[in-house]
Image (spheres, grey):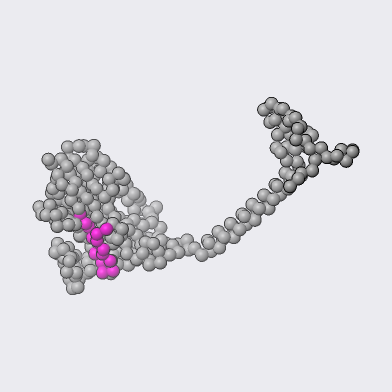
Amino acid sequence: MAVRGKENENGVYEFPYMAKPVYRTKWEAFKIFMWNPSTKEALGRTGQSWAKILLFYVIFYTGLSALFAICMTGLYATLNYDRPKYVHNDSIIGNNPGLGFRPIAEDEGALIWYNLKDQTRTMFWADLVTGFLNGYKINRTGPTSKFSPDCDFDQPPVEGSACPVTVSDFGPCSPPFYGYDSVSPCVFLKLNRVLNWEPNYYNTTEGLPAEMPPTLVQRIKTAIAKNESNQIWLSCEGEYDADKEHLHNATFGYYPPSGGFPSYYYPYNHTKNEYLSPIIAVHIKNAPGGVMINIECRAWAKNLVYVGGSPHKRKGSVHFELMRDDVL
């Protein structure tokens, strides 16, 4: 397409293709860019151009802000501040609480590796446990306490409050070393929170699963005699046949000794002022050294689904590995 040039008084169009460009220094070009007195332009735009573009963005961002506010208002109108919008089978967490363990080192994954000859390594694991238990050392009694008075099977928590968790009754799993200065280390287990989930307990000797360990059956019988059988039970053992062989001289102790999560901690409810998941210390007595042992701990309740094996499919249980390499 042809571009018309400037028409002179003779009716001839002149095209400035041979016009000599105006030379300016960088400083002069910058000043002209900031303010061009011949065209009345600032930063390449006239006052009218600036007014138009500013008006456009004011209208654009005002509309965008209004749209965002309407969307957020609609979203918050669907939320309940006392509980999540999606719970149980409608949520990602589901209706089957998972079991977790401590201590966990970020660079070790599920492996607990220590050495009795290495004090630094011993303190590494002990410090991880101490950090975990510090979250439980909050005010439990007195007028400023947010917890119900001490609970037991005959005394449920006060309405709107949760039961405190005692962390001073762990026997050999107590500070400062939690067993990591010996051949019998301790691992702490807790059940993940699921809102308003209520366990269906194994509280009689009838209908117990055939795969339930005999030691756990005996603990249930002891609890029944004390009228304390409404608990989510725990059991730990070697995960594979080789691990069970390695642990043939080892035993598992539980603190508190019942080895279960008592019923007065359930259900977990967001409307409570405070809530701490109960914890159980597992004392692995006389664990062998010089070999890595796979250990699986399982939670037992009638409405707790158990799936072992792959970490991505595991339910109702937790896997960790124990290795003490001071034995050559």
User: What range of the chain is rendered magenta?
Assistant: 295-310
Task: Please tell me which residue lies in front, 150 or 292.
Answer: 292
**Can you say whether 194 is above or below 176 in the image?**
below
Q: Main secondary structure of the magenta part?
A: loop
Pinpoint residue 38: horizontal percent, then vertical percent. 79, 34
Task: Please tell me which residue lies in front, 14 or 34.
Answer: 14
Q: Residue at x 69, y 50 (%)?
A: 56
Q: Quadrant of the C terminus?
A: top left
Q: Residue at x 20, y 54 (%)?
A: 295
Pinpoint residue 126: horizontal percent, then vertical percent. 25, 43
Pinpoint residue 303: horizontal percent, then vertical percent. 28, 69
For the question of whether residue 279 can be seen, the reply is no
Pinpoint residue 74: horizontal percent, then vertical percent. 55, 63
Q: Residue at x 14, y 44 (%)?
A: 290
For the question of whether residue 202 can be seen, the reply is yes
Task: Kindly give the residue lying farthest to the right in the view shown.
Answer: 9
Task: Kindly give the residue lying farthest to the bottom in the view shown.
Answer: 206
Task: Please tell me which residue lies in front, 139 or 195.
Answer: 195
